[in-house]
Image (cartoon, coloured by chain):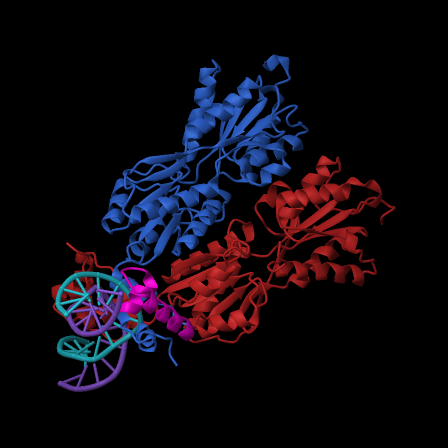
Chain colours: A red, B blue, C cyan, D purple
Amino acid sequence: MNPPRLQDVADRAGVSTATVSRALSGRGHVSSRARAKVQQAAHELGFVVSYHASSLASGRSRNIGVVLPYVDRWYFSTVLEGAAGALMDAGYDLSLYNFEGDRYRETVLTDFLLRKRLDAAVAVSLYLDPTETAQLLAAGIPLVGVGGPLEGVPTISIDDLDVGRRATEHLIGLGHRRIAHIGGVNEHGRYFAMSRGRRAGYEHALAGAGLPVDPAWSLVSDYTFTDAYQRAKNFLADPTSRPTAIFAASDEMAAGAILAARDLGLTVPGDLSVIGVDAHPIGEAFGLTTIDQHARQQGTRAVDRLLEHLAGKNNEPTNEVLPAHFVVRSSTGPATDPANA
Amino acid sequence: MNPPRLQDVADRAGVSTATVSRALSGRGHVSSRARAKVQQAAHELGFVVSYHASSLASGRSRNIGVVLPYVDRWYFSTVLEGAAGALMDAGYDLSLYNFEGDRYRETVLTDFLLRKRLDAAVAVSLYLDPTETAQLLAAGIPLVGVGGPLEGVPTISIDDLDVGRRATEHLIGLGHRRIAHIGGVNEHGRYFAMSRGRRAGYEHALAGAGLPVDPAWSLVSDYTFTDAYQRAKNFLADPTSRPTAIFAASDEMAAGAILAARDLGLTVPGDLSVIGVDAHPIGEAFGLTTIDQHARQQGTRAVDRLLEHLAGKNNEPTNEVLPAHFVVRSSTGPATDPANA
DNA sequence: ATGAAAGCGCTAACAG
DNA sequence: CTGTTAGCGCTTTCAT
């Protein structure tokens, strides 16, 4: 016995398939009497619409793509969780497209995204050149970007420049003068646009306080704990050129720096203050001061925005800036060495 | 101008739609001459098949579901990466279903999975009762499980009992006699079946070495760094009842324990040896000895197995056991306190 | 408010 | 090897 079709429900309820469709989808008017009969019949039969048939006929697929460069990293998986939740709530399916750096970038962009199975897509921290963006939009795939600027596309993000500045100013306010930065780029320098903004904020804050901006104090890592650990360890090894504070562009890197400092016998925040960005759960154990960028919320907000878009409202390609909040813990404290004050 | 349809390609190539379909999908025989013309025409038109139409007509959707309880945790996101890569390679789409603990469990199981848009699904570390499994199979959704036993379903996993035993025996072999364990369960005790196996392996190894098994030395955490950190800190605070070694069921928990030990002024491995499971990248910075469970590979293997299944081979509901490898680093060393030897 | 009927775009017999 | 044709299961005018 095959799965029940719309026709089976119609027969059982004594109405036409058109009425069943209307009753079940909520589009168009159906008498409450008919609706009840239909729902009853559908339930008895265990009917579930075939989404392929439904999509083919209607042109809507209740399926949204989430495209990201990595999934096994905290920021991305957290945004993904947020997006997944919002989509579940809305009854949408989620198709995942993972670039894995650049490994599947071309394939995803040219093969997968164009298969007409998506109503829309959210692009997380993705760099797309204008041609690529245009191609997607031409294929009828409305886009919302998260965490990175995307030309001509509505976008959700935090103000990375401001975050970088606030973090740095927090350290300056504690009396620090020798402040290093750990930022990140990936192998191709393509993703992680946020790094640029945060670094710029760091430099602005230094300049604003009349402090020198030394490129040698701006480390480049890859956003991982271990890489930041190693770089910080090297950097902090020389006592003569040691900073009293570090602003890291992510909590994982910040935590790595704290571990490195401890391995070198330094105390935090006694010898070194460290501040990160993210509110990554690991930060708690390190007592890490951070700026919460509400990553999960970025995912849910992106989906909600996309849904508004699909509903025909809010189509402006504007950048929506979400707030980020300070979380002061114990990894930052007053600068103590008078030589550095 | 609407997106080109199969008919447009057929017209342009001067053949029938059937030939176009065959030429493009590779099913059935087509003269190389016709194939060339079709490919040419399809390329010129920028034709991409409508997967809804294709799926409706063929019953196959080239779409596989990945169902998991969390996505923002290392093990799950890593398995997901592996599965996503394997699916890309095979030209399949990936639909993501995230339970978020139990929040969407019912919804996913009853609403989403039954919509007939999936050819199959991989269930990562999921507990399903026999009724649920049967329901999915009845809906025609072949299943492969990863990292957890699933009745009557083919499964990919490591031998958690063996892993627990080997980890513990490593410590015993180093002369440790006072060995604690940090395992994990979630709020509902439903997922993380692996914890049970690893704990059992720990107990077996102790018993096998004639050591007492004290339930009080078997901590229960939630698989996160910070929770393990706090529990380890409490546990290690009392010098009189302190173990000389800890086996943690995951690297994040192991790293948390190391941080806790250091915060208490203990050295690793001098005062305390710690071993984990996972080969989580964070372990490197901590010099963590671990057992690599090749999480990514579990994901790719699950997909490959599913694909074999769909191709009609290898349908036995057997449990396939993947190897796990020791990675010895610096967090484990010989027991030094003679009182404990 | 409801039914009849024409597709949505593609695949898979079936014939030839 | 290729064309014809009948659907796949649902949605949506268009009537009534």
Position of B139 with respect to A256 (left or right) is: left
The picture places residue A341, in percent across and down from the top left corner, at: 85, 49
Q: For residue B230, what is the image quadrant?
A: top right
Q: Residue at x 55, y 38 (%)?
A: B252
Residue A32, image x and y in percent? 20, 70
The answer to whether residue B84 is above or below residue A193 is: above
Taking the magenta stretch, the answer to whether it contains residue B21 is yes
Quarter holding residue B331: top right
Which residue: 31% across, 77% down? Answer: B11
Is residue B1 visible in the rendered structure shown here?
A: yes
- Check the picture and name the quadrant holding the C terminus of chain B: top right
Q: Is residue A328 above or below residue B20?
A: above
Q: Tell me residue B226's x, y (percent).
A: 56, 40
Depth check, front residue: B313 or A112: B313
The vertical placement of A230 against B49, above or below, is above
Q: Is residue A209 left or right of residue B157?
A: right
Q: Residue furthest right?
A: A339
Left or right, B6 with respect to A235, comes to left
Nearest the camera: A300 or B97? B97
Range of residues picked out in magenta: B19-45
Residue A330 is situated, as x and y percent measured from the top left of the image, at 68, 44
